[in-house]
Image: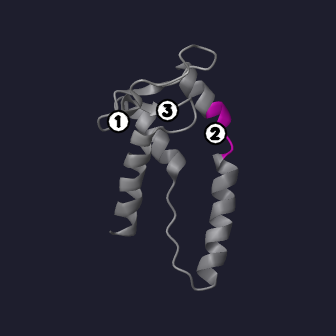
Amino acid sequence: MHAVRANAVDVLQSPLVVISQSSLIAGELQASGAEVTTIDTFAFITELVDSGVALGIDNVTDMCVMPNVAPFECETPNDYLFWDGIHPTKAAHRLLASVVINELGY
């Protein structure tokens, strides 16, 4: 297990709580007549990490910016899934946006 994966898993163990809360909120909204589409972003990111290489993102396990390691910036953010170990990069957000657009049927 890579350090980034361990960090992401350690920090993201709370999605079960978030998903539960989101499910409750979605249920309440649906009961009120609202149309609700839920997307499991945690599962999506986990799938990208587990797949090895994610649709043109070369590095899905390491963080682009290493804490406490100069130069404290990422020179090739489009090559990374994670900015700092838990936050997705712009490239990852682009992939997630395509999933959301697909799920919404646009």
Residue 16: give x, y in percent of width and height. 65, 49
Graded by Cα atoms within 10 Å as few (under 14), some (14 to 19) or many (20 or more), the crowding at tag 1 reads: some
Name the residue furthest bottom.
33
Amino acid carrying label 3: it is Phe
The residue indicated by pointer 1 is: 54
CA–CA distance in space, label 3 to label 1 = 12 Å
In the rendered view, does 19 fall on the left or right side of 77? right
Residue type marked 1: Ala
Magenta stretch encompasses residue 96: no
Which secondary structure lies at badge 1?
loop
Counting from the top left corner in percent of width and height, residue 70 is at 56, 13
User: Foreground: 90 or 92?
Assistant: 90
Q: Is residue 41 above or below residue 74?
A: below
Residue shown at 52% from the left, 64% from the top: 38
Q: Which residues are magenta?
A: 9-14
Q: How is the image coloured?
A: one colour
Which residue in the structure is indicated by mark 2? Answer: 12
C-alpha separation, residue under disc 3 versus residue under disc 2: 13 Å
Nearest to N terminus: mark 3 or mark 1: 1
Which of the numbered marks, if any, corresponds to residue 82?
Answer: 3
Q: Amino acid at mark 2?
A: Leu
